[in-house]
Image (tube, grey):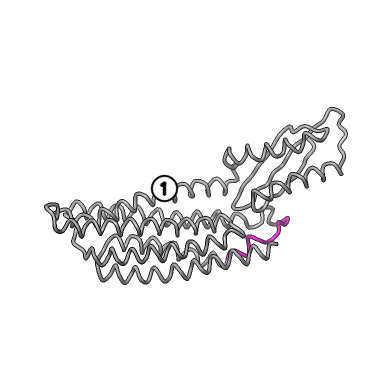
Amino acid sequence: MKKDKLKIEKKILRLSFLGSLLFIIAEGVMAWITHSHSLLTDCLFDAADLVMIGPFLVLVPLLYKPVTEKHPYGYSQVESLFLLVKYSVLLALTCNLLVENVKLLMHGGHEVNAGKIAVFEFLVCIGCAAMYLILNHYSKKYESETIKAELYMWKLDVVSSLGVAVAFVVQVLLLHTKLHFLTPYIDPAVAAVMAILLIREPVVVIFQSIKNLVLFAPEEEVLSQIRSIVDKHMKDYPYEVTFLDVIQTGRKIWVEVYIGNQTDVIHISILHQVRDEIKQELKHKYDQVYIEIIPD
């Protein structure tokens, strides 16, 4: 089962890597030809993402290694560390691009060939949509946090490419109106808006990755769901849950259920049975789950 998941994940990451490489080359060439800051913003953002995919292809097999005494949490924190580094780079790059384009707006903007950029971005939008559908098809068999991040990037590319294309179609239309004086501002304005929209996701993932690295409890929604499943299975046995300890790091979740009863008699076979029941249900909701039932 783990080998199948590893195979699917590596396949998705390879496809994403190759697709990103092709689009980055195309965007880079077009940005150089047109001197468009919007295309440059998109190109640099995708390039930063691409640089991070390469090393992660090497790291993915580590995430499937079993837990040992030497590595009690396995290598799951490698994923959290990777996502932290990746999105920190993207956040720094996005902030820098935002500042540069705001400066350009304050200095009168600049002219670009809006027609060429609009056609190019429509083609990019179609290509990104096709890539997203392909990756989404494979992800239905298995989806990790890393795969979700890649799907998000492709979905973002679809939306941003379409938005940029529409913006430059508007610029073409403005050239023949009294508002033609606004055209130099459209390219840097679009680039600045893209940067603002791109900031939120890195910030959210950075905070989540930090929580995972320091082994904080997961979100309240996850805790409530796990607590509900544990309570549902424990009610059929003569024990009560005294404390629930949940740790999430990367794609792995550790659940320690502390129990007690009035007679102080604990049956090991019953503990194994209830543990297997809880684990079986949680496996359908979370990728890699470890359950321990501990007498309090």
- Is residue 182 left or right of 63 when viewed as pictured? left
* Stretch in magenta: 59-69
Q: How far from the left and from the top, in percent, is residue 172?
A: 20, 60
Secondary structure at numbered mark 1: helix
Q: Does the stretch in magenta take in 65?
A: yes
Q: Quadrant of residue 184?
A: bottom left
Q: How far from the left and from the top, in percent, is residue 62?
A: 63, 63
Q: Residue furthest top?
A: 262
Residue 196 vs residue 245, the one in the foreground: 196
- Is residue 278 left or right of 196 when viewed as pictured? right
Q: Residue at x 86, y 31 (%)?
A: 264
Q: How far from the left and from the top, in percent, is residue 29?
A: 31, 72
Q: Quadrant of the N terminus?
A: bottom right
Q: Is residue 100 above or below residue 29?
A: above
Q: Residue at x 35, y 71 (%)?
A: 26
Residue 7 vs residue 93, the one in the foreground: 7
Residue designated by label 1: 200
Residue type marked 1: Arg
Q: Residue at x 62, y 47 (%)?
A: 248
Q: Does the stretch in magenta take in 198?
A: no
Q: Residue at x 35, y 66 (%)?
A: 123
